[in-house]
Image (spheres, rainbow, N blue to C red):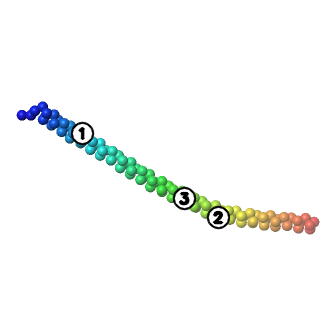
């Protein structure tokens, strides 16, 4: 029938088979986890890229608005100087008439 050595080889072959199946399952699980992590990192990069684009757009709009605002402030200051000079001249003329 079967000798003890044959039974040992049969048991060892089943052990190797189960060890191989367990090792394959473990490798599969690790690969699945790494793929999920890679997908999450890719999504994070996409979100960060969109945030960066949004911030860049906001910054460009802010820069253009502040440059336009600077011109408006300069024009307003010149206008105020002109108005103040006119008022000063009128007050001087009124005092000189009296």
Quarter of the C terminus within the rendering: bottom right
* Identity of the residue drawn at 51% across and 56% down: 52
Would residue 20 appear left or right of 86 to someone viewing this image? left
State the residue lying farthest toward the right: 98
Quarter of the N terminus within the rendering: top left
Q: Which residue does the numbered mark 3 point to in the structure image? A: 56
Q: Looking at the rendering, which quadrant does residue 93 occupy?
A: bottom right
Tell me residue 15's x, y (percent).
20, 37
Q: CA distance from mark 1 to mark 3?
A: 55 Å
Tell me residue 97's x, y (percent).
92, 68
The numbered mark at residue 68 is 2
The mark nearer the N terminus, 1 or 2, is 1
Would residue 60 appear left or right of 23 to someone viewing this image? right
* Identity of the residue drawn at 51% across and 58% down: 53
The mark nearer the N terminus, 2 or 3, is 3
Depth check: give the residue in front, 97 or 87. 87
Depth check: give the residue in front, 21 or 4. 4
Q: Which of the two marks, 2 or 3, is nearer to us in this view? A: 3
Q: CA distance from mark 2 to mark 3?
A: 18 Å
Q: How many C-alpha atoms fall within 10 Å of the one at disc 3: few (<14), some, or many (≥20)?
A: few
SS for dot 3: helix
Q: Which residue does the numbered mark 1 point to in the structure image? A: 19
Would residue 28 appear left or right of 77 to someone viewing this image? left
Tell me residue 6's x, y (percent).
12, 35
């Amino acid at each position: 029938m079967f000798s003890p050595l044959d039974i040992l080889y049969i048991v060892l072959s089943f052990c190797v088979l189960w060890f191989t199946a367990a090792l394959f399952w473990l490798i599969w699980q690790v690969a699945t986890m790494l793929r999920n992590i890679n997908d999450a990192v890719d999504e994070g990069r996409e979100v960060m890229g969109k945030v960066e684009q949004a911030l860049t757009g906001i910054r460009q709009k802010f820069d253009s608005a502040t440059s336009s605002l600077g011109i408006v402030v300069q024009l307003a200051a010149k206008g105020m100087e002109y108005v103040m000079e006119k008022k000063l001249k009128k007050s001087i003329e009124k005092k000189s008439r009296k």
